[in-house]
Image: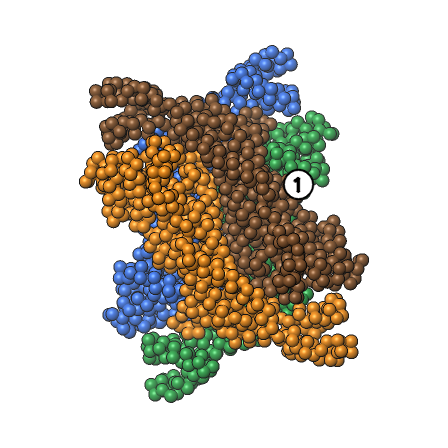
Chain colours: A green, B brown, C orange, D blue
Amino acid sequence: MMLERFLGSGAAAGALDDTAFMQAMLDFEGALAGAQAAVGAIPRAAGEAIAHACDAARFDATTIAAEGARAGSLAMPLVKALTAEVARTDAQAAMFVHWGATSQDVLDTALVLVSRRVLALVDDDVGALVETLIDLARVQQGVPVLGRTLMQPAQVVSLDFKLAGWIAPLVRGRARLREAGARALQLQLGGAVGTGAALGEHADAIAFAMAQALQLRLPDAAWHTQRDEMATLAGALGVLVGSLGKIAQDIALMAQGEVGELVEGASGGSSTMPHKRNPVGAMVALAAAHRAPQRVAAILGAMPQAHERGLGDWQAELAEFCGLLASAAGAAAAVRRAAEGLQVDAARMRRNIDALQGLVFAEALSMRLASTIGKAAAHHRVEAWSRRAVEQGRHLRDVASSAIVDDEALRDRIPASDVVALFDAEAAAQHASRLARLRLKDLARQSALQEDSAPWAAWLPGDDGDDIEEDA
Amino acid sequence: MMLERFLGSGAAAGALDDTAFMQAMLDFEGALAGAQAAVGAIPRAAGEAIAHACDAARFDATTIAAEGARAGSLAMPLVKALTAEVARTDAQAAMFVHWGATSQDVLDTALVLVSRRVLALVDDDVGALVETLIDLARVQQGVPVLGRTLMQPAQVVSLDFKLAGWIAPLVRGRARLREAGARALQLQLGGAVGTGAALGEHADAIAFAMAQALQLRLPDAAWHTQRDEMATLAGALGVLVGSLGKIAQDIALMAQGEVGELVEGASGGSSTMPHKRNPVGAMVALAAAHRAPQRVAAILGAMPQAHERGLGDWQAELAEFCGLLASAAGAAAAVRRAAEGLQVDAARMRRNIDALQGLVFAEALSMRLASTIGKAAAHHRVEAWSRRAVEQGRHLRDVASSAIVDDEALRDRIPASDVVALFDAEAAAQHASRLARLRLKDLARQSALQEDSAPWAAWLPGDDGDDIEEDA
Amino acid sequence: MMLERFLGSGAAAGALDDTAFMQAMLDFEGALAGAQAAVGAIPRAAGEAIAHACDAARFDATTIAAEGARAGSLAMPLVKALTAEVARTDAQAAMFVHWGATSQDVLDTALVLVSRRVLALVDDDVGALVETLIDLARVQQGVPVLGRTLMQPAQVVSLDFKLAGWIAPLVRGRARLREAGARALQLQLGGAVGTGAALGEHADAIAFAMAQALQLRLPDAAWHTQRDEMATLAGALGVLVGSLGKIAQDIALMAQGEVGELVEGASGGSSTMPHKRNPVGAMVALAAAHRAPQRVAAILGAMPQAHERGLGDWQAELAEFCGLLASAAGAAAAVRRAAEGLQVDAARMRRNIDALQGLVFAEALSMRLASTIGKAAAHHRVEAWSRRAVEQGRHLRDVASSAIVDDEALRDRIPASDVVALFDAEAAAQHASRLARLRLKDLARQSALQEDSAPWAAWLPGDDGDDIEEDA
Amino acid sequence: MMLERFLGSGAAAGALDDTAFMQAMLDFEGALAGAQAAVGAIPRAAGEAIAHACDAARFDATTIAAEGARAGSLAMPLVKALTAEVARTDAQAAMFVHWGATSQDVLDTALVLVSRRVLALVDDDVGALVETLIDLARVQQGVPVLGRTLMQPAQVVSLDFKLAGWIAPLVRGRARLREAGARALQLQLGGAVGTGAALGEHADAIAFAMAQALQLRLPDAAWHTQRDEMATLAGALGVLVGSLGKIAQDIALMAQGEVGELVEGASGGSSTMPHKRNPVGAMVALAAAHRAPQRVAAILGAMPQAHERGLGDWQAELAEFCGLLASAAGAAAAVRRAAEGLQVDAARMRRNIDALQGLVFAEALSMRLASTIGKAAAHHRVEAWSRRAVEQGRHLRDVASSAIVDDEALRDRIPASDVVALFDAEAAAQHASRLARLRLKDLARQSALQEDSAPWAAWLPGDDGDDIEEDA
């Protein structure tokens, strides 16, 4: 679907396309045969012949999908085609294709394998995005910008403070994705009802060898209808998309013509409207932020899968999971692109503050007065002065200064310099920036650690498969 | 994605694939140029050259999608490619490609055009399904089957009664889809901000001619950010999928080994478990019933689109709408397949009733007694008798008959034949069947009317475009 | 829950609270007994005694709910309590409480009754909102305002054009709600498995009389597990909330400090930030726009209800439906409030246009040039002039005028007055306003018709129940 | 709402009701004043006076909610009422109510506080449920039961194997809830835009003291619009509800009249249908499993909150979070109830296996043959024999035994005893049970560890609580 590709990322699309998914299914079959040959459950030659045939280029995904729809299982037609392919050169080996496994073993493991590839892309994009934003925060340190609440200007913060608020959830989100991935990316191998009965006495050793070959976690048990680890991974993806969406939302709002504080580096133009700098990275991330929550809901809603294999719910989960991966990858890549070369208009940020005639400092003024004349009286005065500032188009600082000078009770207790200081956007920004810098230092450290490690600790069952044999 | 095709229908997949969607976009451009030429807004030769170039075979969807992702618009790269294509033969004509239209005009109209094709497929499948089920109800008229509530056997109904409950929502759902389609399948043509300003003085006439050419409804105004008609159509699709899911749910439950009342005609087998008759039609429909509600939620959630064109939400809506169409088409085709050749085991239905030792008739017994000895006393007795029936493994009819004969107060007031009649599964089924037959007659009539009419009345703007000119 | 009340409407909360819901359940029981007495199925005195006891003030909702949770049915403890209440004065009558009905009959009918009350509130609020916006459009006729696409300024439209875009979906949404309500607000009366068997020979007459008494539509059959009409009504509510959310979104964006074009009449203040005019009506509607789609999804997802009564899904649907009603009522009331007294700053709208230095007219300029020198050349020139305008901080009109005068090829073919005319915000707004006025006239007419009719035509089964008796 | 209480748990309802929520808001205000007094930011007497007034019994939640709806903030009217309450005894102290905090500080912290109470209830119920199921698995060790896939009987497993599949996600789910809770249950204290500027120089010390007083985690920064930790907690709740729903689904299916393998301890009866044992615990959990995913989606969908405080999305999140808590608590309590006293009919489980005439052992038979005559030939034979078994109503074991004896090629290579052994349900169950016992041992250990620790490590800002006392 063009529209899906439009909202996705090219790399993720490649990792999720028909060929890639079919290859992942074949990787399972190849690893199964290899493991069975290694432990002596099937002839060594059969293992080799099967592994050799497990190449997606030999099969037609469209035919497999069509037959799968008729059969009610994508795995069955592929196993049949693989068996025929193996039989072309080794009839004996063909007998051992898919030996002891069930359709769901193939499909769940294939999903895990393609998920790993997409998660690595997402991890990489988020890492790069974090670095980009940390750099930006360094460059823009202490730049005053309006803090806005309920879509209204509120008080002055600094741009690095705002950026720290974008970055922290990304660092946490990346950690969360790795944790959830480390648990969810596990082998599925349970046979018809999860007991692995048809794998025979070597079941444990086969699973161990397969997990090692595919570099997947070896689960405590088959998880055919225990989907909580996959659902948790889905949730982590959903949360990350939400955090990316928040950044996109802020960019889109700050890029509005009337605000003009940010412009996306790679913003889309319009042939007929030359002033337009469409925030197309934000667009893709916002689209994902609309879609991903529903993917997560579908996956959660499909959890109550009956007995030992679900009917309809499991199948829905697989498809929704792929859609979620595509959305998350699209969003991560898009926000990364948007951030790289993000143009900051610090002067405009300042003008937007100044345009508010000092009203954003009213709280500070009120609290300063309160310490002198009490909260109620202070509030009352500031309200009146603010009204006057709005009506007369004057700056609240000037209104307040005049009023204080004119007031015997205040004149001597509140020096003029104090009033002026309250309205200092730079000072307000510095306060915010101090908080931000402490935090960014810590975030930079965490991000560096993340960059230095693989997305998730590869499952390493040990140096020597023999240990297992002895135990078994 | 293989998993999507696995859960979809081949025909719908074809109507929604890259080529089809791109062709729909080109159909818009061709119709626009044609209409503009017809009203004299652009040279006749330009109209012809553009229309001639609007053939998806000339363009590469993958490239367009990739460039679209960069540009933040699928329409812009296609317009560019189309312009180049026209320019190859007619540089003058190339100037008029996409003249006065905006990206969203192309994409929304393309969505409408592909939707129409998929809706026609769904309409057809639902129609055939209704006919199949009505036939089945005729054949199975009056067959007793357990009514079940809260997943427990409750009382006896008839199979045609149960089928009428499946059919009615399908007939209503088909009508609903046609109504919603008739309103939502409308031309989009508003230019940059929906005013059609760039279309010039001929704007109305161009729209009229385009709507006629594409056989689409002419809207009251551009609906760039008024998505209520599309959302309503999405809702109608979601409701239909829910009604199909209800049938699938019942089939899956009745096909359980321990129930054994129904087997899907085209049920999937298992190479290693020969007794399995997997309800694969039900599976596909249930998967859709998990997914479609989330597509509808995404479309509803994307409705608050800002100003004159949304950022992210609109784009999400387009993609989700296509996913919803695919799910609905998959579900309709699957339940149709499941119903065609659905095998009914009336004997098993009867055995399932008989296995309950008459307890499903306890309410009837209680009400018969109540009219004689009052509700409370009746309830008390029947409860005791039911307990006895369960404990002693006897039929409640026999327990009750003995007890009544032994009871002086009841013996003369409740004849033995009355008691026996209360436990008559056939009679209970006949009562239900009488209701069902009346209803089915009406449903058959409605379905026949639906079969006789086109899915939705084609928009016919009138015989003569000149009328419009005069009005304008 | 305070948070629910905070986001709801007081009137709807009253229609959905414990007492109201319990009274609706009692209304069912009273109407049932009344109808049964009327047709002679139970003694007239029993009918009267039961109807008399059906007063929510006599029962404790908290106890009923607690016992219902234990029993797995809200209806059972209420029926028990009602029976005890009737028995206090008429032991004989107590025998006939709930006679022949099932729990779901009570609960579904109660849901329908409370829904009707809330829908009437929503209908009323939407009607008033439409009238308010139509009036506003009249007052603000032709006021130029920026049209914005992808969150960027695009071209000039008029405020009444924008308002027409808000109003049309409300008028359609109100009509949709009435249609869906007219079909969904129907009696539920099917007994244990939907056959009405326990109602005896008078079943049809009882249903007829009940429907008449409760002024509800008489359904073709029990709809215990055919939820499509309710789901369609839910969809209509969801779509309406989406259309209200779109208005709220626009208001919130236009009320931003940097845009400053609109202020909500009843905007919330901040004690410490006097410049804040929080768009609290928009806030409530946007909250609903986040929540309602999920309620709709839950209701659609719960549609595949097993057999003759669902387990868990039906119960979820009831609760979600009430939540949806509350959200919709909250949104409608909030946007109505926001619109009443909405302050328009036409001067600011104009300043926002002017601040863009004429770039929003670039498309018009380009098309004017194209008709003289061809599209490609025109586009090329306008792009260069726009760049110059941005770089030099000049108005595009001035840049273009100078350039045309300086250019021999253009000087004579494009009069200066033509160029100036292209940059006329008023003229652009007038074009949009002309479209809007035609449309608003039609919308006003439709709204007036809606105001003149009841929310949905009351179901009127006829003057005389005797007709039915003869048919039966 | 009665329907909400019906689907919730009494204890959770109490923790989430108006009074509880208002008290949580007041706990924030009290702790704030206490902390400010402790660090000398406000007078000691003011701190005491405010803390003393922070008692929900003094305020009317209905009024506060109504005023909050008007003001667009629940916190503002409560702060106003609290100020008035304090002023009744200490006008000076009233000045310091809510000093330096913002509405969102109050509401987010209140949400966190009520969440903690509900999470503790859920944790407790899940713990008890795990223990109950582990005990059941011990008692029912090795009992053969059908494994079922795609809603069809597949092969034989053991009941403890099935129970281990229920238990493991609960143990993981409880751990996940604790982890997510430990991170998400943190203080919110950022003031107007998250910089804590109005808290003055003591901001850090105040936050520290408040976190200690409320025993909440001290966050790295205000998280006004960084909702990822709350969304992650929501996801963990959603996943747990899904795992509970899976158990409920299995119970409901196994409790069907035609299956009859399980009956809920506290199953709901029906006054008129004495045979019904409605699985009402499963019902409540399944209802939650329909609802919770949509709550999670709403929370995820609300994540892109603009700037420093969201408009509509944040408010929606708060309400949805409470709904999610209520659903999760309802589900956990219901499945716990269902499991306590769950009745197992081992004989029926066995009869359900036997009724399948040995067909569930066809895979085992096929694999045994394959090792002798090859997979293809084996499959071919077993298929033929299975068909014969079905047609003749014989046991596959007998059909196979006769066929093998009659076949020269097989007779000598496959001893009769081997064939009989393949059809041994006990042996198949023992294989599954061996796996289960290993796993259950580990799960029991993990559960014991969980029982021994508090739901989440209390936040401890220092080594010694006394230090704090001295400071205070």
Point out residue D419 in the picture as x, y percentages from the top left corner. Answer: 55, 18
Name which quarter of the figure residue A201 lies in.
top right
Q: Which residue is mark 1?
A: A23
Q: Position of residue B402 (x, y in %)?
A: 28, 18
Q: Indicate the quadrant containing the C terminus of chain C: top left, top right, bottom left or bottom right.
A: top left
Name the outermost residue toward the left: C89
Q: Residue at x 50, y 48 (%)?
A: A297
Identify residue type, mark 1.
Gln
Taking C420 as reference, is A239 above or below it?
Answer: above
Q: Is residue C117 left or right of residue C170?
A: left
Q: Residue at x 36, y 76 (%)?
A: A379
A125 or C444, which lies in front? C444
- The location of residue B129, given as percent across then percent down, is 55, 35
Residue at figure coordinates x 32%, y 72% from the top left: D95
Is A73 located above or below residue C462 in the figure? above
C352 vs D192, left or right, is right
Asked if D114 appears above or below A84 in the picture, the reply is: below
Q: Secondary structure at mark 1?
A: helix
Marked residue chain, label 1: A
Position of A339 relative to A453 (above/below): below
Judge by depth and name the residue closer to the eye, B52 or A60. Answer: B52
Left or right: A137, with B367 as reference point:
right
Q: Is residue C398 left or right of residue D289?
A: right
